[in-house]
Image: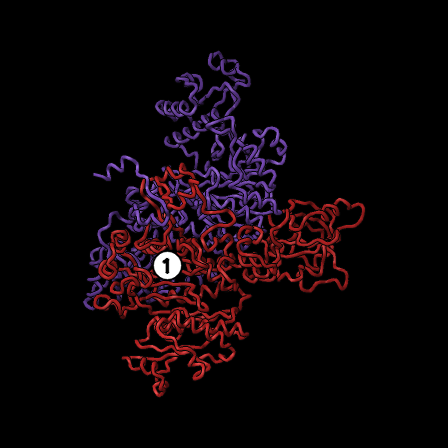
Chain colours: A purple, B red
């Protein structure tokens, strides 16, 4: 049962500390056992400890016939031998009757296991502890599920009893590694590069277009705070305030209703620097990730490759390409000009008409049925053509999407989805295309500064946010043709996931006002404090934010960000353990001058 | 103007890093200048740099007659010599015309100042930089106040232009020191003692009696999240989850309406440990503070002294005694038994009647007028007797408060207030009683577990919170006479301010249920998840929380916690810079199913 337990956590930490052997030993001795009466953790004892009297605290993982038990704590497992002699009958009774997951203290002597009974898979597998005294500190009632990683349980149950799920190896590992990575990041920023950790408010006011911001009613009638989506304004104001280098592990809030694998509160490594350019921020982040990267996950090489937004769309059909595998989008127009397929010729006859394709080298492993699935993907995304199966005879290894307009986001993204879908299918068929233990970082740069609004394409909106500075080469276009302006925004992509994004900001009040009022046609009044701040000698500045939850989930290869958060919300934003959000009484709403507007259906239900 | 500028910040940091001289030098060179094009900060150049070409970025602190200027950044000041020759006329024009607080880049050569012009008060006072090229990066419009520490401005103005106030030496110093102290605390907890930094949710549900919790409407009609006052429940659940050692620099929320020197959001160093006792937590915290204590503030000695709640009340009339000075409360009943003052005799005739006093050794410096003031203090607090001036003839150095019931909180606290008030008066008269650079830490222990409710003294409420464990010697009293039970709560007091508090928690579900239901008569349903968690093998555990804002403000001797927070709210909970909280439109409230209940007066005002 316990022999599958993986290597203890201590190793992770020691590799981080990076100290000499002697100090390591010292650390090993005092690290986890300071300020408490245990002598050792359950993952610590080795043959070198034989003969020592030890006191351990932990949970009963397993107990067999009153003969022995396995004691577990956050660091590992130790085999405990229950005494069988008359003098210890009380101890035997205690330990034999304690339910699994009860928490106990045992004191006893470390002995070598009898020859042949060592367990090489267990770090403490050479020894066992012969109990002298024991105490049941708290008994455990019947569990809703077993605390074993390989026992499957529904996520709802795991979240309801999160405190039990936290005892699993995997969650302990994820949370501890997260803590250590963040600590290393802090060391890099704060101790090595002079960044100042500044806490910024989370009770602020609504930002323009901040539809996803939670509201917090205040005691002033009609006035609300807002929980910001990021400390964007504050970090820029800190630069105006001469802080020079700011960072914060910042709690951010986003109310998106129900969305899978999003959390209403999340954490970002938030960074801002004065007098810096795009390359400066990129080198900083590469250094940061290299410094904090856990040894056990291999090493990463820097600088990270860079790709323009245009290249990313053209080659991968997405602005966050997974560059762990090929199957790039290629233009096969020239090749097809010789063909006599009517709708292809049709497409090519348009001005700048092209036909693009991806080549799936091992596509033959895909079954006919799966090809139909990918057709559906392509159809749904593309919504223009369907090409029922003809290519399977012409190009058995390829997928083709004809195009009758300049390469646009829509067409490329159809092929981009197809590429990922095909990778899924190939992997389902047994090929490894995207090894989760391989880490491909990528900068995507030169985004457009503005995009047409989805609901009204004649109007423009910021591709990222209104504070992003235009590309230095495109500044004059801002006033003549803003749709053509590239921005100084950069995204950091890891294995096809956006894990960070940032930009050089506008530091000229005049330019900022022009963008807000003339290009975006927004009321700049709500940002008057920021606009005014830019007039008081604001330095040039830029920054970035890394999505910590996503980054850690990729590092530990967790299926969801919920696996790297101690107390996550369900995809509907609920806390299933504590039952939040919850009803409150009208009296509790009174000081905030609000009342509930019950939807009619609920009003009716309440009546009956 | 600039010669009063204090020692540069770099020194603080280096004393923290605690590395060898060689590494210090290396750090000095790269620390603040990585990833940017400046070669040095404005606080860095010394005579050793003479002859080097340097590039500096900073703000114009002062400019004189086109001859020289003083450039400032976060680290210090450098004198810049403006070239006067024809070839540099452009540079001269630029720099002479740039308003104060404009942000500039200058490149030039470091030279020794002419003999006799060195400024020994300025770290860079031996050198000056002869400009070759310069660039105005952003101009500054007319300032609402000068960026100089000694210029007085109203706090409202400082908060409205917080980004300008942040440029002051004092705020830069406070925020940077805060960042460094917290970093050291993290190193101590995370790297030296195996604590895991775990982030807990801030969107949770209302706790019983959580009248001070902000509400956050959710998209489910009638359901609200709550912003918790501390991660109390989560940290206990982490212990149930086997995390063993948790810490977090936790954002907490408390809606108290208007209260001076309180903030609606604040930060605590939040700690919890399994298998620990009160002494264990106390030693941990003493080590933590000693390790993170800034060198420039002297050193602190451990262990900290300890005092029971009863002693604190009897000797100092408060549960947070300022032990930097004497003037303890003494019982003078025996002495006064021989007197013939009628109301004193009266008081002493009651069962256990006592007369208490404080002796003010240098009380003669207090003027008659001030004695009247202290009378008022005493009267207001005490509200039972006034003793108009008779003691001034009898005991010119003392204040006496007669008492006709057992020493109670009320009487002692009257004398406690009098003691502090007298200290104020003595210090106003020029004596130093409470040196702010002397740090007296003190543990106050053995608090009562329950107190009579203020509004209904026949009912009990928790003196701290319902999860506090009873003192081991008093456990049986819990069931017989709960008013007599002492708790395992401990407060950490620094110079008369509560800077932390914690306790060993109840880990038995049965005991916790008894406290909630039988003693406190509360509905335990809202805490059912916690009660249930205790039944699944919860380990014995305890913890503490330090109020970071208050602690830092005492360390830097700031008059208010607002001086150690980058963007504080006013005492009415307003952000004067961004104007939060603010009105939102009814449409924005719609997704949250709430509407504003306008008070009548506002409704009327809105109409007109």
Residue B378 placement: quadrant: bottom left
* Residue A199 can be seen, yes or no: yes
Q: Nearer the viewer, residue B452 or B21?
A: B452
- Identify the residue position indicated by label 1 in the image: B272
Residue A157 placement: quadrant: top left
* Residue A20 can be seen, yes or no: no
Tell me residue A268's x, y (percent): 46, 46
Tell me residue A480's x, y (percent): 61, 29
Q: Is residue A176 above or below residue B543?
A: above
Q: Nearer the viewer, residue A601 or B545?
A: A601
| Subunit ID for the residue under disc 1 | B
Q: Nearer the viewer, residue A24 or A183?
A: A183
Q: Nearer the viewer, residue A218 or B318?
A: A218
Residue extending furthest toward the bottom: B338
Q: Is residue A269 above or below residue A308?
A: below
Q: Quadrant of the C terminus of chain A?
A: top left
């Amino acid at each position: 049962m316990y022999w599958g337990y993986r290597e203890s956590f201590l190793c992770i930490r020691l590799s981080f500390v990076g100290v000499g052997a002697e100090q390591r030993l010292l650390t090993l001795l005092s690290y986890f056992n300071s300020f408490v009466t245990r002598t050792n953790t359950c993952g610590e004892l080795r043959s070198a400890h034989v003969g020592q009297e030890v006191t351990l605290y932990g949970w009963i993982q397993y107990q067999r016939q009153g003969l022995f038990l396995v004691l577990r704590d956050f660091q590992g497992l130790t085999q405990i031998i229950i005494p069988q002699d008359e003098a210890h009958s009380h101890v035997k009774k205690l330990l034999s009757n304690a339910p699994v997951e009860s928490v106990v203290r045992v004191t006893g002597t470390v002995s070598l296991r009898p020859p042949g009974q060592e367990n090489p898979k267990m770090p403490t597998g050479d020894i066992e502890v012969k109990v002298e005294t024991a105490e049941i500190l708290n008994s455990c009632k019947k569990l809703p599920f077993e605390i074993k990683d390989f026992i499957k349980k529904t996520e709802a149950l795991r979240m309801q009893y999160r405190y039990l799920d936290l005892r699993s190896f995997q969650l302990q590992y994820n949370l501890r590694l997260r803590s250590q990575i963040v600590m290393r990041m802090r060391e890099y920023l704060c101790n090595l590069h002079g960044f100042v950790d500044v806490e910024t408010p989370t009770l602020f006011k609504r930002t323009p277009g901040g539809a996803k911001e939670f509201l917090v009613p205040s005691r002033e009638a009609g006035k609300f705070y807002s929980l910001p989506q990021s400390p964007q304004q504050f970090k820029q104001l800190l630069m105006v305030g001469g802080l020079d280098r700011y960072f914060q592990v910042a709690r951010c809030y986003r109310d998106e209703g129900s969305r899978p694998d999003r959390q209403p509160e999340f954490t970002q490594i938030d960074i801002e620097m004065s007098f810096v350019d795009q390359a400066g921020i990129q080198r900083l982040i590469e250094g940061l990730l290299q410094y904090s990267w856990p040894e056990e996950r291999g090493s990463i090489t820097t600088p990270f490759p860079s790709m323009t937004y245009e290249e990313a769309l053209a080659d991968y059909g997405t602005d966050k390409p997974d560059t762990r595998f090929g199957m790039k989008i290629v233009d096969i127009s020239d090749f097809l000009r010789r063909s006599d397929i009517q709708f292809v010729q049709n497409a090519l006859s348009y001005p700048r008409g092209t036909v693009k394709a991806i080549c799936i080298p091992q596509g033959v492993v895909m079954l006919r049925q799966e090809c139909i699935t990918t057709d559906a993907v392509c159809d749904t995304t593309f919504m223009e053509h369907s090409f029922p199966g003809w290519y399977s005879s012409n190009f058995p290894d390829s997928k083709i999407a004809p195009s009758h307009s300049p390469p646009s986001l829509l067409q490329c993204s159809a092929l981009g989805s197809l590429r990922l879908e095909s990778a899924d299918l190939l992997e389902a068929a047994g090929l490894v295309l995207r090894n989760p233990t391989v880490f491909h970082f990528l900068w995507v740069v030169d985004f457009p500064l503005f995009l047409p609004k989805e609901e009204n394409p004649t109007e423009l909106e910021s591709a990222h946010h209104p504070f992003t500075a235009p590309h230095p080469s495109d500044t004059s276009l801002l006033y003549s043709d803003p749709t053509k302006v590239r921005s100084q925004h950069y995204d950091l992509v890891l294995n096809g996931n956006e894990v960070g994004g940032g930009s050089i900001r506008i530091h000229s009040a005049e330019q900022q006002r022009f963008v807000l009022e003339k290009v975006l046609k927004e009321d700049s009044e709500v940002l008057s404090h920021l606009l005014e701040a830019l007039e008081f000698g604001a330095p040039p500045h830029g920054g970035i934010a890394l999505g910590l939850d996503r980054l850690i989930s990729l590092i530990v290869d967790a299926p969801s960000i919920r696996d790297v958060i101690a107390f996550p919300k369900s995809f509907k934003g609920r806390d299933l353990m504590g039952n939040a959000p919850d009803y409150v009484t009208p009296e509790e709403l009174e000081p905030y001058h609000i009342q509930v507007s019950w939807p009619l259906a609920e009003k009716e239900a309440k009546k009956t």
